Image (tube, helix red, strand yellow):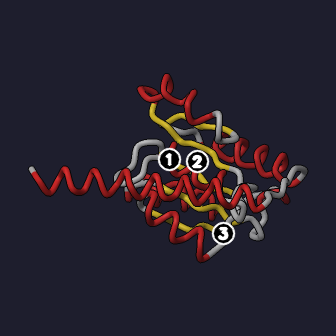
Amino acid sequence: MPNRDPVLEPMNTVLIVEDSHSQRECISYQLAWNGMNVIQAYDGIDALNKLQATCPDLVLLDVVMPRIDAYRLCRLIKANPKTQNIPVVFITGKEQQLAIYEGIKHAEAYVSKPWQTRELLQTIKRVLLEAKGSTTTFSADAWFRYGILTLKLIKFYENRTSAWQKS
């Protein structure tokens, strides 16, 4: 039995959003082995559905995904008053690190691929500890801004779909 850290006990649930099945399974196994509950999503749309059904303690996002990338998904998570206090950690390949600045403005941390299990666990632990000490609440205006952001995202994907169907 591994030596488990009390910060990473089963009450902590992590939503892993990773389009690579093998990487998603590997991360899931590592986190479960260290005492965390794991929920898996294969892309941003699947993650939004899982966020509606559950309330994880942390979201671990692959940056490059089909349908909705991590930056848009993170903005949606942080704009939604129901999920805005859930910390987000990006997991990214080295070639994407220059682009991480845009996302890190919204996320709490990031881990580079290929990840080291110890670094991943330490980052999750640090982010969970920081999140336990800070929560904010939003007003009706925040719900309105979230609605506008959601409508813009829907319009964006409608335009992409119609352009794809015309080709």
| Residue 75: numbered disc | 2
Residue positioned 17% across, 52% down in the render: 164
Residue 111 versus residue 11 in the image, above or below:
above
Contact (Cβ within 8 Å) of mark 2 with mark 1:
yes
Q: CA distance from mark 3 to mark 2?
A: 24 Å
Q: Secondary structure at mark 2?
A: helix
User: Amino acid type of disc 1?
Assistant: Arg
**Is residue 132 toward the left or the right of residue 140 in the image?**
right
Q: Which residue is mark 3?
A: 37
Q: CA distance from mark 2 to mark 1?
A: 5 Å
| Residue 72: numbered disc | 1
Contact (Cβ within 8 Å) of mark 3 with mark 2:
no
Residue positioned 51% across, 71% down in the render: 49
Which residue ends up furthest to the top in the rendered image?
98
Q: How many marks?
A: 3
**Is residue 97 toward the left or the right of residue 136 in the image?**
left
Q: Position of residue 87 (x, y in %)?
A: 71, 51
Q: Quadrant of residue 116?
A: top right
User: Amino acid type of disc 3?
Assistant: Asn
Q: CA distance from mark 3 to mark 1?
A: 25 Å
